[in-house]
Image: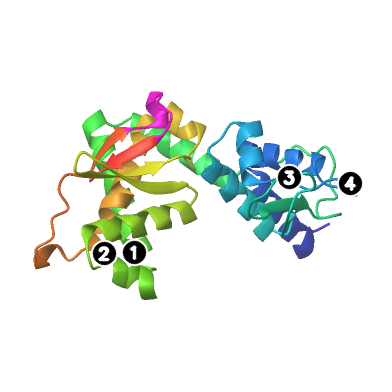
């Protein structure tokens, strides 16, 4: 008996939404705080409970909301003091009817693991060069996908281009932001979408650096007098740091 298209689509959607263990934990937490007498969760609440950066919590919450698993509501939480209304996330009733499911391994994870093992068989310098080259190609493709204000802003200066790169990385799951220190700009990533695969195969971190290089090369008019300088990795989760940073 063949599998129905609707069932396949449902499984695919659930895998995409809950393939990340952090996202599963966040959904469970939101479910615990949803119901008739509950007010849902906020990004800051999730960050504190799950132990992630607020930007990472917001990224996962928005992904779950986009998939129809959470509903975004606003308003004052009963008993809260003065201040702006909080953006809260509440589990949508019956959005997930499968109980006690062991969610399948994501195909992305399998491909990344395969990539990591393949790169491990190459000499370190060659493997890193290859990973960065792939990242640059993908970064240029990401830049080509920018339109309107983001693209125009990126071409005005290196600083605004770096902000455009951080925004694009966040959209791809990195939860990135820019930071200036000692006359040098950095992109800080508070979440690594490559997860444990990058920890097992740190050479994959070169893909991040390549993405930054590829996007900046496409966004900044280097021939017009701007200089990208040396794009280098300063810290990474894979090496035991608390965040990933790329200096420009």
Q: Nearer the viewer, mark 3 or mark 4?
A: 3
> What residue sits right under mark 1 in the picture?
143
Identify the element where label 4 is drawn: loop
Q: Percent position (x, y) of residue 112?
A: 47, 40
Q: Percent position (x, y) of residue 43?
A: 62, 45
Whole-number angstrom distance, CA of label 2 to CA of label 3: 44 Å
Whole-number angstrom distance, CA of label 2 to CA of label 1: 7 Å
Residue 105 in view here? no
Q: Nearer the viewer, mark 2 or mark 4?
A: 4
Identify the element where label 1 is drawn: helix
Q: Nearer the viewer, residue 49 or 105?
A: 49
Q: Nearer the viewer, residue 235 or 141?
A: 235
Q: Quadrant of residue 38?
A: top right
Position of the N terminus by quadrant = bottom right
Name the colour scheme.
rainbow
Crowd tier of the residue under label 2, counting other residues whose Cα lies within 10 Å: few below 14, some 14–19, many 20 or above:
many
Q: Residue furthest right?
A: 36
Whole-number angstrom distance, CA of label 3 to CA of label 1: 43 Å
Whole-number angstrom distance, CA of label 3 to CA of label 4: 15 Å
Asked whether 242 falls inside the magenta stretch, the response is yes
Q: Quadrant of residue 54?
A: top right
- Name the residue rendered at 60%, 37% in the picture: 47
> What residue sits right under mark 4 in the picture?
37
Q: Quadrant of residue 139?
A: bottom left
Identify the element where label 3 is drawn: loop
Relative to 222, say whether 178 is above or below. above
> What residue sits right under mark 3 in the picture?
80
Contact? badges 2 and 1 (CB < 8 Å): yes
Whole-number angstrom distance, CA of label 1 to CA of label 4: 46 Å
> What residue sits right under mark 2 in the picture?
219
Magenta extent: 235-243
């Amino acid at each position: 008996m063949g599998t129905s298209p609707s069932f396949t689509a449902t499984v695919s959607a659930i895998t995409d939404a809950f393939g990340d263990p952090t996202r599963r934990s966040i959904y469970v937490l939101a479910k615990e705080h949803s119901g008739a007498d509950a007010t849902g969760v906020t990004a800051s609440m999730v960050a504190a409970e799950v132990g992630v950066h607020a930007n990472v919590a917001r990224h996962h919450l928005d992904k779950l909301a986009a998939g129809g698993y959470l509903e975004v509501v606003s308003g004052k939480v009963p008993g809260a003091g003065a201040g702006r209304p909080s953006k809260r996330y509440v589990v949508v009733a019956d959005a997930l009817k499968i109980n006690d499911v062991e969610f399948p391994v994501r195909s992305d994870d399998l491909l990344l693991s395969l990539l990591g093992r393949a790169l491990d068989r190459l000499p370190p310098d060659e493997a890193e060069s290859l990973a960065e080259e792939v990242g640059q190609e993908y970064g240029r493709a990401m830049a080509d996908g920018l339109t309107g204000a983001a693209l125009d802003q990126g071409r005005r200066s290196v600083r605004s281009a770096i902000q455009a790169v951080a925004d694009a990385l966040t959209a791809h799951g990195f939860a990135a932001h820019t930071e200036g220190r000692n006359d040098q700009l950095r992109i800080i990533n508070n979440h690594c979408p490559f997860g444990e695969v990058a920890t097992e195969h740190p050479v994959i971190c070169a893909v991040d650096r390549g993405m930054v290089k590829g996007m900046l090369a496409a966004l900044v008019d280097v021939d017009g007098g701007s200089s990208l300088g040396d794009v280098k990795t300063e810290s990474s989760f894979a090496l035991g740091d608390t965040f990933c940073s790329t200096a420009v």
